[in-house]
Image: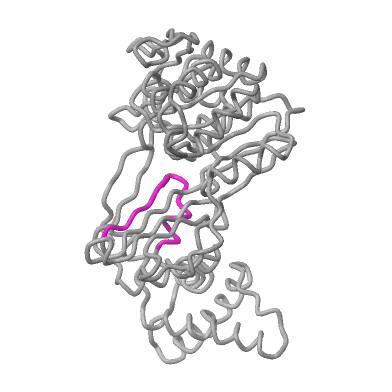
């Protein structure tokens, strides 16, 4: 990672060019110009300023700047500074910062610490630039923020004081590499026969819950499942922040909103589920069920509306138990004796995802509720369970290969 660190150091000459580029953009805006700060516009100005610097440097016999300096200037002005190179790397799926000298990335599910150190000022500058583009803010009164970046990546920040000593930053990149069940079969995530079964279930209007631990590939699988729906179906998705990557001709995607600094204006996932039912959906998709919105989802499924959602759970059976318990958070008047049979009868399939030690994700189990309840737990029958003999790739495919 030495090259990365070297590439992210901004020399005094480069910093001067950064300031001149910013000054030219401000000047252009002041005289009635476009004030364009798009990467292409900034790159044109940066090229001109680097050439100007090199002309003077050659005349004086001092050091000139190479083409890499142009990209660093563009990243500093129009991008996300020292993080831009990581964001542009198709192999990296997630970036997190625990401290200025503790920066990590994940490639194909495997985390690694980078030999990279930033200053607290650099971290704050990058985060504030991201939040400005997302229309969000963070301060002492609101020390947490969850936001979507322009490319769909998800940003989560915890302010110091809540996080010990330093800001805690996490960026989950929006990757378009896996969008279909066939692609997951190519990756060895599930057998072709199981993929065909799931595709048939989605086209037939069955309701599917995708379960698994964090980073087990739940959202990726959910997107691939929804992409298998019939093209004439109207799909409405609701998420706290946009993460799903779905190709569908009739799609409405809704995103929640955090409260303002005054504590007003919040749009919860539960509110979105209720609103989505007024939009004539043929299928309701909930990015992740984790709170009282589970009640509204179960009620919708119980009326015959096909649905799909993800939930954190340790197994398919555990997912049904959790989905039966979360609605109780909606209020004391919610009776589990109603919720439990409603879940058992309205959920058709549970697909459980897992992550292997090498970072690869796969479908570990597909279970179907029988509609019966035994000991307060919905009874299921196993339709598929992964075994060591199931086909898997010789190695996890890189993101660049997945996008091909």
Q: Is residue 355 magenta?
A: no
Q: Position of residue 60 (x, y in %)?
A: 42, 92
Residue farthest to the right? 232
Q: Residue at x 26, y 66 (%)?
A: 161
Q: Position of residue 168 (x, y in %)?
A: 31, 59
Q: Is residue 103 left or right of residue 78?
A: left
Foreground pick, 243 / 305: 305
Query: In the rendered image, is residue 130 in sight?
Result: no
Query: In the rendered image, is residue 75 in sight?
Result: yes
Q: Which residues are magenta?
A: 83-98
* Colour treatment of the image: one colour
Q: Is residue 97 magenta?
A: yes
Q: Residue at x 72, y 39 (%)?
A: 279
| 146 is higher (above) or lower (below) than 222 | below
Q: Residue at x 50, y 29 (%)?
A: 221
| 210 is higher (above) or lower (below) than 96 | above
Total residue callouts? 0
| Quarter occupied by residue 117 | bottom left
């Amino acid at each position: 990672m030495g090259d990365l660190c070297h590439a992210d150091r901004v020399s005094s000459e480069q910093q001067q060019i950064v300031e001149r580029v910013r000054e030219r953009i401000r000047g252009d805006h002041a005289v009635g110009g476009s004030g364009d700060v798009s990467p292409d516009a900034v790159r044109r100005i940066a090229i001109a300023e680097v050439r100007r610097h090199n002309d003077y440097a050659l005349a004086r016999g001092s050091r000139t700047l190479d083409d890499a300096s142009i990209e660093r200037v563009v990243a500093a002005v129009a991008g996300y500074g020292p993080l831009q190179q990581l964001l542009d790397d198709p192999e990296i799926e997630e970036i997190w910062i625990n401290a200025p000298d503790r920066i990590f990335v994940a490639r194909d599910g495997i985390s690694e610490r980078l030999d990279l150190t930033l200053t607290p000022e650099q971290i704050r500058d990058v985060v504030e630039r991201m939040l400005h583009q997302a229309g969000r803010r963070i301060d002492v009164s609101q020390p947490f923020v969850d936001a979507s970046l322009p490319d769909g990546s998800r940003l989560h920040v915890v302010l110091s004081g809540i996080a010990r000593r330093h800001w805690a930053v996490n960026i989950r990149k929006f990757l378009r590499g896996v969008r279909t069940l066939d692609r997951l079969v190519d990756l060895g995530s599930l057998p072709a026969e199981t993929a065909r079964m799931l595709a048939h279930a989605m086209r037939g209007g069955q309701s599917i819950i995708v379960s698994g631990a964090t980073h087990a590939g739940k959202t990726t699988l959910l997107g691939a499942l929804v992409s298998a729906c019939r093209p004439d179906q109207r799909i409405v998705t609701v998420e706290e922040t946009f993460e799903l990557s779905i190709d569908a001709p009739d799609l409405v995607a809704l995103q929640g909103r955090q409260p303002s600094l005054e504590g007003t204006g919040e749009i919860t996932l539960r509110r979105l589920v209720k609103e989505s039912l007024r939009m004539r959906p043929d299928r309701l998709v909930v990015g992740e069920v984790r709170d009282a919105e589970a009640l509204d989802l179960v009620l919708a499924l119980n009326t015959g509306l096909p649905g799909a959602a993800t939930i954190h759970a340790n197994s398919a059976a555990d997912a049904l138990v959790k989905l039966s318990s979360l609605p109780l958070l909606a209020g004391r008047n919610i009776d589990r004796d109603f919720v439990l049979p409603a879940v058992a009868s309205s959920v058709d399939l549970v697909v459980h995802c897992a992550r292997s030690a090498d970072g690869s994700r796969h479908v570990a189990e597909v279970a179907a509720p029988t509609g019966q309840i035994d000991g307060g737990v919905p009874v299921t029958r196993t339709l598929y369970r992964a075994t060591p003999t199931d086909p898997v790739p010789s190695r996890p495919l890189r993101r660049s290969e997945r996008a091909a």
